[in-house]
Image (tube, helix red, strand yellow):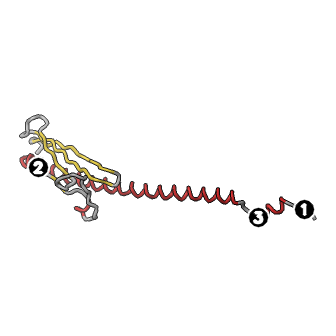
Amino acid sequence: MASQPVVHGTQARRRQRGLTIVETLIAATILAVGIVSLTNLLGASARLNQSGREKEAALAALGTQVAALQSADFDDLAALDGADFAAGAATEGSGLLLRPPAGDADLQAGEIAVTAPTGEPLRLLELVVSVTWQGANGVHTLARRVRRSRLGS
């Protein structure tokens, strides 16, 4: 039978004490830093998720408006210059309505601009459909540019 070495004095007391106060404080500090970092990460993730939902709603609104403009009669397009529209999935029923930025007089996030890029409005029109909204991470704008010609009508 092998004999165990006998430990006397300071070494024996140290093994029985466990962790020192300094070691406990260091462990608590590391744990606190980890918890704070995780909390910040969750907040950033929530903001990015909201931003993605907003962008999805803006793209859906743009797609709906562009499809309507592409199917509209060419002669009716010029009258749409400066027209505004509500933008967001609330129009499709999911409840997310994009808020226009502060100072927007018409309180609508969507806008349609009609120009004649060649100077001949009876032959070619350029339609710019844009959505500008106050989002979770600031003011954002998405736009789509479509050209319509009388020949293509």
Residue 36 appears left or right of 138: right
Locate residue 92: give its quadrant: bottom left
Q: Which mark is residue 80?
A: 2
Residue 75 in the image, given as x and y percentages of width and height: 6, 47
> Residue 95, percent across and down?
27, 64
Residue at horizontal 27%, vertical 48%? 141
- Vertical order, 124 against 90 (above or below): above
Left or right of residue 8, residue 91 in this image = left
Q: Residue furthest top?
A: 118
Element type at mark 3: helix
| Mark 2 nearby-residue class (10 Å; few <14, some 14–19, many ≥20) | some
Residue nearest the viewer, comparing 106 with 124: 106
Closer mark to the observer between disc 1 and disc 2: 1
Q: Nearer the viewer, residue 19 or 74?
A: 19
The amino acid type of the residue labelled 2 equals Leu
| Three-letter amino acid code of the residue under disc 3 | Arg
